[in-house]
């Protein structure tokens, strides 16, 4: 089905269309129709490509943000694991059994806990892991006391 359209061309475009129609069999409508169809097809492809590029850019930015969040979460997990490992090591190797309600034992436990916190702070600030500092703690770096 065809629709009638009134279109105005500039003189140089009209002259070029007349010259082209004279060589191609004289059908100006078909020439304009074919040219406009091709132009619309190319424009639609460029538009789809632009939209795809923008979408890929958004996905890439989101992936970067997720990667940063995962990295931060892993760092937190490493610090938490470090604290847990030091606490277990401290409890199993350094801390002796304490009697309840004994003020001297409570003071000793508080001191050992503060040493634990200090050691954890040192490990985190140096970026060292428990396994790297375990030898030093075993040699007495965490606490000089080993008895009750």
Image: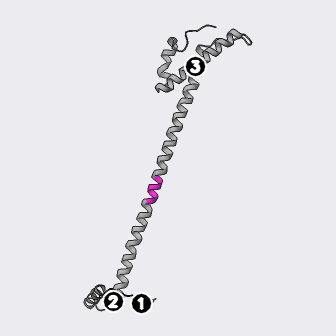
Q: Tell me if 76 is positioned left or right of 52 in this view.
A: right
Question: Residues at badges 1 and 3 in contact (C-beta under 8 Å)?
Answer: no
* Residue shown at the point (30%, 85%) measured from the top left: 13
Mark 3: secondary structure = helix
Residue 71 image label: none
Secondary structure that dominates the magenta span: helix
Mark 1: secondary structure = loop
* Disc nearer the start of the sequence (1/3): 1
Instruction: Give coordinates of residue 127: x percent, y percent.
Output: 47, 27
Q: For the residues marked 1 and 3, what is the alpha-carbon distance in whole angstroms?
A: 87 Å
Q: Are there few (<14), some (14-19), or many (20+) residues within 10 Å of tag 2?
A: some
Mark 2: secondary structure = helix
Q: Tell me if 52 is positioned left or right of 35 in this view.
A: right
Q: Which residues are magenta?
A: 54-59
Task: Give the label, 2 or 3, closer to the camera.
Answer: 3
* Disc nearer the start of the sequence (2/3): 2
* Residue shown at the point (39%, 79%) measured from the top left: 37
Res 110 quadrant in image: top right
Q: Is residue 128 visible?
A: no
Instruction: Give coordinates of residue 119: x percent, y percent.
Output: 54, 20
Is 58 covered by the magenta stretch? yes
Which residue is tagged 3? 116
* Residue shown at the point (35%, 81%) measured from the top left: 35
Which residue is tagged 2? 28
Which residue is tagged 1? 6
Q: Is residue 47 visible?
A: yes
Q: Residue furthest right?
A: 101
């Amino acid at each position: 089905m065809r629709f009638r359209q009134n279109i105005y061309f500039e003189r140089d475009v009209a002259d070029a269309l007349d010259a082209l129609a004279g060589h191609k069999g004289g059908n100006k409508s078909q020439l304009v129709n074919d040219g406009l169809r091709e132009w619309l097809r190319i424009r639609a492809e460029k538009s789809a490509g632009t939209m795809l590029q923008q979408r890929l850019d958004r996905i890439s930015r989101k992936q970067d943000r997720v990667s940063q969040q995962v990295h931060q979460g892993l760092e937190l997990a490493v610090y938490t694991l470090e604290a847990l490992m030091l606490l277990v090591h401290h409890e199993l190797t350094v801390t002796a059994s304490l009697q309840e309600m004994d003020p001297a034992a409570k003071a000793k436990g508080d001191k050992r806990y503060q040493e634990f916190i200090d050691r954890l702070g040192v490990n985190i600030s140096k970026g060292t892991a428990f396994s790297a500092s375990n030898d030093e703690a075993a040699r007495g770096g965490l606490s000089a006391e080993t008895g009750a």
